[in-house]
Image: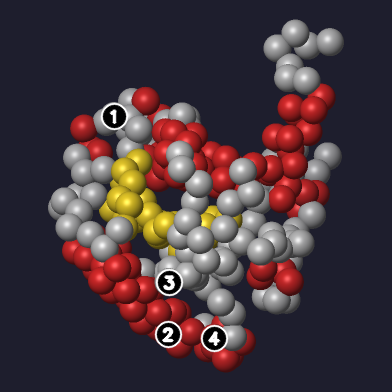
Amino acid sequence: MNQHAYSDEEIGGVYRAIRERRDVRHFKPGPLEAGQLERFIGAAHNGPSVGLMQPWRFIRILNPALRGAIHRHVNDERILTAQALGQRADEFMQLKVEGILSCAEVLVVGLMDQREKFIFGRRTMPEMDLASAACALQNFWLAARAEGIGVGWVSMFDPQQLRQLCAMPEGSQPIAVLCVGQVDEFYSAPMLELERWDKRRPVADVMYVDNWGSDS
C-alpha cells in the first residue's frame, strides 16, 4: 500500500467532487454560510502556479449597481456571441449562460498587472500565468462542490470593458466572472450536454501514445 495515499473514503470524496462538479447557472436565494467564501478562495490560493507567481486576483462584487452593470455587459456580449454563431444563434439564445443576478456572490477574477516581470516558467510560454489561474479556479470549484455550493464561470465579456468597470489597473486581465451560491440541485450532467449543445468526448479520443493521433 502506498503510505502517502489518503484513505479510500477520502480518495472517493476527491474523485466524486471532480466527477460531480458542474458549471452552474441556476441558483436559489440565500447567502453562503459564514466562512465558506473565504475557504473557497483559500483553496484557490493553494493552487499550483508556475514560478510561484500566484497571478490570480479576486474582486468580490458587493455594490448592487456594479453587479447590475456587469450583468448588462455580459448580456450584451451574449447577443454578440449569438450573432457570431450564425445558424445556431436561436438555439444559443435559449440557453441560460449566467446567474449573475440570482447568485449569492459574484467574483471577478483577474490576472495581476506587471506579469512580464515573472520569467521563471514563462520565457517561452507566457500564457502559463493563465494556466496557473485556471488551476486556482478549479480548486475553488471543487472546494465549493464538496460543500454543496454551485459555481458558474462566466466568460462572455470584453476584457477591456470589464477591467474598466472594476477599476482594474492597466496590464491586468479579467478572465472570469464567478457566480457562487446555493442550488436546489446539481445538474446530472454538464448543462450543455443536457441541452444537447454538445457532448463529452470519450477519453480515447483525447489520449495519444508517443505521436499526436496515435493510440498504440
Count of numbered marks? 4
Question: Label 2, label 1: how many angstroms apart (C-alpha)?
Answer: 38 Å
- Quarter of the image containing the N terminus? top right
User: Which mark is in front, 3 or 1?
Assistant: 3
Contact check, label 4 and label 3, Cβ < 8 Å: no
Give me the disc on residue 101.
Answer: 3
Nearest to the observer: residue 78 or residue 27? 27
Question: Label 4, label 1: how many angstroms apart (C-alpha)?
Answer: 42 Å
Question: Label 4, label 3: how many angstroms apart (C-alpha)?
Answer: 18 Å
Res. 66 visible in picture: yes
Report the amino acid beneath label 1: Ile
Residue matched to label 1: 119
Q: Looking at the rendering, which quadrant does residue 17 occupy?
A: top right
The residue depicted at 83 percent of the width and 39 percent of the height is 216
Report the amino acid beneath label 3: Leu
User: Which mark is in front, 4 or 3?
Assistant: 3
Res. 131 visible in picture: no
Earlier along the polypeptide chain: callout 4 or callout 3?
4
Residue matched to label 4: 93
Residue 119 placement (x, y as % from top left):
29, 29
Question: Label 3, label 2: how many angstroms apart (C-alpha)?
Answer: 18 Å
Earlier along the polypeptide chain: callout 4 or callout 2?
2
Nearest to the observer: residue 101 or residue 24? 101
